[in-house]
């Protein structure tokens, strides 16, 4: 009897919660979508892969084909080459920046094979322009090889958070990047975090968000 009452309560409660949303025609349709569907809804091609790690975990990853840089790369490139843009930025937050994958040893590194255009620019340990081959490079850069972006030219105040157990933005690669950032205002290497904790970490409010808010108050 109690089980039946409990089930009825749960069903009734669920319906009661959903009703306001069903009546609201202004709700964002992305609420009901998974990652792949959101990417497609935004007008981008989406690919999905299942990757098995050496210890038996099956990870589902998504890829947007033809993407040339990750978000951190775009920021470092833009702020170092476009001073008129850099002057408008009060403070840049770099979360687990992947400007190099030179020291990646994890089996998960093979995920980056799905983003070959990005790997060409960061696997060598330096931040390069997109390498489209000799003809492409000559047409766009007037040289056979892509040019190298100089992060030291970036003057934007920068705060960096990295993970001590990050398998993609490894501590060694992050340390190399930190040496290149001339206006580094803050760095916190979070002890037990890996790369995915920056997306899903349940303790992010404690180790990340509070610090970000405090820094925003410091640079109003």
Image: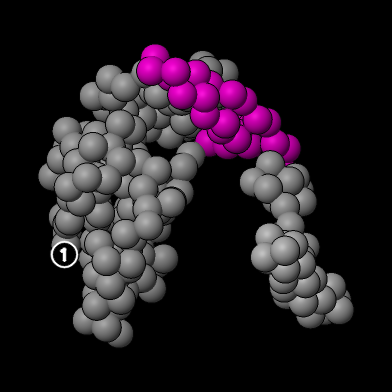
Q: Is residue 101 left or right of residue 16?
A: left
Q: Is residue 42 left or right of residue 113?
A: right
Scheme by which the image is coloured: one colour
Residue at 77% of width from left, 77% of height from top?
Answer: 16
Residue at 64% of width from left, 46% of height from top?
Answer: 35
For the residue pair 22 and 156, the one nearer the viewer reads as 22
Q: Is residue 143 left or right of residue 175?
A: right
Span of residues in magenta:
44-68
Could you say whether the residue bearing mark 1 is in a helix, strand or loop? Answer: strand
Query: Whole-percent x and y of residue 90?
Result: 31, 74
Residue at 24% of width from left, 55% of height from top?
Answer: 160
Q: Is residue 20 at all visible to an observer of this figure? A: yes
Query: Whole-percent x and y of residue 73?
Result: 40, 44
Residue at 68% of width from left, 60% of height from top?
Answer: 3
Q: Tell me, yes or no, whether the highlighted magenta stretch contains residue 60.
A: yes
Q: Tell me, yes or no, whether the highlighted magenta stretch contains residue 20.
A: no
Q: Quadrant of residue 10?
A: bottom right
Quadrant for the C terminus in the image: bottom left
For the residue pair 88 and 31, the one nearer the viewer reads as 31
Query: Whole-percent x and y of residue 41?
Result: 77, 51
Quick check: 45 above or below 75? above
- Numbered label tally: 1
Q: Which residue is mark 1?
A: 185
Q: Quadrant of residue 1?
A: bottom right
Q: Residues within 10 Å of mark 1 (few under 14, many from 20)?
A: some
For the residue pair 176 and 163, the one nearer the viewer reads as 163
Query: Whole-percent x and y of residue 151?
Result: 26, 46
Q: Is residue 10 at all visible to an observer of this figure? A: no
Quick check: 57 above or below 35? above
């Amino acid at each position: 009897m109690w089980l039946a009452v409990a089930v009825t309560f749960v069903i009734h409660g669920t319906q009661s919660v959903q009703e306001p949303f069903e009546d609201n025609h202004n709700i964002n349709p992305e609420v009901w979508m998974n990652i792949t569907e959101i990417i497609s809804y935004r007008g981008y091609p989406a690919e999905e892969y299942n990757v098995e790690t050496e210890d038996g975990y099956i990870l589902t990853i998504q890829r947007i084909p033809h993407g040339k840089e990750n978000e951190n790369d775009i920021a470092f490139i833009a702020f170092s080459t476009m001073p008129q843009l850099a002057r408008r930025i009060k403070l840049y937050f770099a979360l687990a920046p992947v400007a190099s994958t030179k020291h990646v040893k994890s089996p998960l590194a093979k995920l980056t094979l799905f983003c070959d255009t990005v790997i060409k620019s960061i696997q060598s340990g330096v931040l390069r322009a997109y390498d489209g081959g000799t003809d492409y490079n000559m047409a766009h850069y007037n040289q056979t090889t892509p040019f190298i972006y100089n992060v030291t030219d970036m003057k934007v105040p920068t705060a960096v958070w990295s993970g001590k157990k990050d398998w993609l933005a490894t501590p060694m690669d992050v340390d190399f990047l930190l040496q290149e950032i001339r206006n580094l205002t803050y760095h916190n290497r979070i002890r037990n975090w890996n790369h995915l904790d920056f997306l899903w970490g349940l303790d992010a409010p404690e180790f990340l968000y509070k610090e970000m808010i405090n820094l925003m108050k410091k640079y109003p």
